[in-house]
Image (cartoon, rainbow, N blue to C red):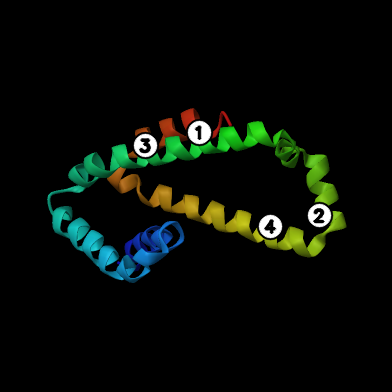
Amino acid sequence: MITPAISVLSAVAGLKVAVPSLGSLVLPITVAVLTMLFAIQHFGTRLVGSLFGPVMAIWFGVLAVIGVVEIAKHPDVVRALSPTYGAQFLLNRPGVAFIALGSVVLAVTGAEALYADMGHFGRAPIRRAWFVLVFPR
């Protein structure tokens, strides 16, 4: 029960960044979203997935477009994929590298939540998502 609450709260908290005047509405909006989610949950995860699937597809599509635009503006960021650059980073800036690797661990453990969702989506859709969306990159 705590994972959805933290996820929704952190997502809605972004409103404070985009529109600071809505900062006082973060908690009520979070409660409303969670109430709605738990209210429709008894109808099955198929309904929840059909409602939020398109929203998530749009969200990840927007993130992809923004990422491609930013990489086009600053193509030198692709250097980060080089193992040589990574080794130099570890040797030259060990403190910063430690923090960066900690962030990577957090991202990977966040991906673990995807596998927890196998009960909702099943093995085949998650495999397709990894092979079509993640591995080609």
**SS of the residue at dot 4?**
helix
Q: How far apart are marks 1 and 4 (CA)?
A: 24 Å
Give the residue pinned by disc 3: 57
| Count of numbered tags | 4
Q: How far apart are marks 4 and 3 (CA)?
A: 28 Å
Name the kind of residue labelled 4 in the image. Answer: Ala
First reached walking from the N terminus: tag 4 or tag 3: 3
Name the kind of residue labelled 2 in the image. Answer: Leu
First reached walking from the N terminus: tag 2 or tag 4: 2
Give the residue pinned by disc 1: 65
Give the residue pinned by disc 4: 100
Query: Please, which residue is most extreme toward the left here?
Result: 43
First reached walking from the N terminus: tag 2 or tag 1: 1
> Neighbour class for label 2 at 10 Å: few (<14), some, many (≥20)?
some
Residue 101 figure quarter: bottom right
What residue is at 81 percent from the left and 54 percent from the top?
Answer: 90
Q: How far apart are marks 2 and 1 (CA)?
A: 30 Å
Name the kind of residue labelled 3 in the image. Answer: Ala
Give the residue pinned by disc 2: 90
Q: In this view, does 37 lie above or below 56?
A: below
Name the kind of residue labelled 1 in the image. Answer: Val
Q: In this view, does 87 lie above or below 134?
A: below
